[in-house]
Image (spheres, rainbow, N blue to C red):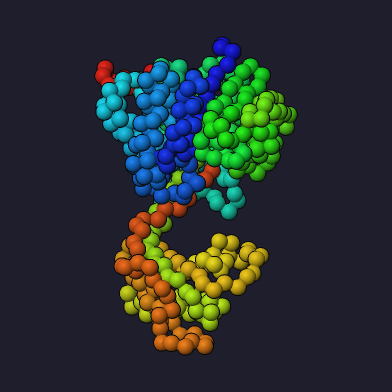
Amino acid sequence: MTAEVRCLGASGQLGYGIPPAAFDQGIATAPDVIAADMGSIDPGMAALGSGVPMAPQLGRRSDLEMLLTAGVGRGIPVIIGSAGTAGGDANVDDTVALVREIAAERGLRFRLATVRAELSVEIVDRALDAGRVRAFRPDMPLTAARLRQTAHVVAQMGVEPLVAALRAGADVVIAGRASDAAVFAAYPVAQGFDMGLAMHMGKLLECASQCAVPAGRDAIMGYIGDDSFVVESMNPTRACVPFSVAAQSVYEQPRSDWVEEPGGAIDLREAVYEAVDARRTRVRGSRWRPSNPYTVKLEGAALAGYRSFALGGVRDPILIPQLGEVTRAVARVVEDALARVVDRRSYELRFHVYGQDAVLGPLETVRTATHEVLVLIDAVGQSAEIAHAVCGAAKQYLLHAPYEGIRGTGGNLAIPFSPEIQDAGPVYELSVYHLMEVDDPAALFPVELNEVGGGPPGALP
């Protein structure tokens, strides 16, 4: 085992542009591996349900090209997790296609490992029947009927499939849905470094320089040794100090001393954060606690309907205090006006009033007067036609709604776009969010190894 591994975290999420100066500095610092996360279900279920990545293709292609040309050209392995945002098969295929295009254009040749994470509904159904699936929340039970409504299901892989791909000789790994931390921990673990330290380091590198002050999305380097690791932002204006590193360690976690991951948890109870200098922090004492049985998180998306929306500004000081009452009245008018052609059970209509509790709703505690608000009319229907009709009616009746004290005969909304109604297409909802017990942490995630740029394809035995 080498004395140290240098892991370069290229980006907090591929597809939105990589600040080039910090990335170039990272490459100049001679990393042993380049890794990046490409997504999660944070942006919602659209990417998994539709198979279309959330990040624009222009950005995805540019970021992938930066990583591939820097890594392959220097013999540095490249690992990308949660490909195409959600890590389903269609998302992975989209990313692999871009990788192949870039390789052909740039004359790159390498061994590509594709690690899939999408599961058939039948696999999950069998585990459900065997009592090996449990819910995170008691109000979200999983049934066979709900599974049948689910378009796609992915399991979140840990380090084991990624390590298998690296040990098989992969130069580039494109993985489906994966633990963010595992994407960065896989190479050090494959080299024999401590799992607890590697996963904790991965937890920090996953968001790039967010663990620095001031926080940012610049590339970050993790240096892991036998008893500790060091993190350093590749932007010289950002400093990884003990407080910011400790804070990022529990990012998105319900506990400050315990981070759940596939197959176990990172135990932070004895973790120590100490400054190496003004810009770097050393971490020691992190421990890996395996779970028994081994569990993976399942994420599934089901079609919920089709969305249409409209926007309008309101600046009438007489109308604004009454908007809650007025929009409720409009909803009743829409239901009555469309009753002959649209079943009320076939749609949902919401009015989000930005500037008036739209973010927190009834939980809002700050009450201040405002002189203008934005009304978002959001209609989701069982068909695109229903959604469009409901949204159009709601817009029209709100535009001309009467209210107490009105001084004109209409024109309540300042509508910024024409056409006023925007059709957003299918809407997907979270239908599976559960833990599943597995016997083999790598068996669910098949690895395929192929030569890119020449040579015969072959499957990993």
In the rendered image, residue 381, in percent from the top left (x then y), is placed at: 38, 64
In the rendered image, residue 100, in percent from the top left (x then y), is placed at: 30, 29
In the rendered image, residue 189, in percent from the top left (x then y), is placed at: 55, 20
In the rendered image, residue 209, in percent from the top left (x then y), is placed at: 55, 36
- Closer to us: 46 or 345: 46
State the quadrant of the C terminus: top left
| Residue at x 38% of width, y 21% of height | 72
Q: Is residue 252 visible?
A: yes
- Closer to us: 284 or 293: 284
| Residue at x 66% of width, y 19% of height | 227
**Residue 148 vs residue 452: left or right?**
right
Q: Is residue 144 visible?
A: no
Against 7, is 156 above or below? Answer: below
State the quadrant of the N terminus: top right
| Residue at x 36% of width, y 48% of height | 50
Residue furthest to the right in view is: 270
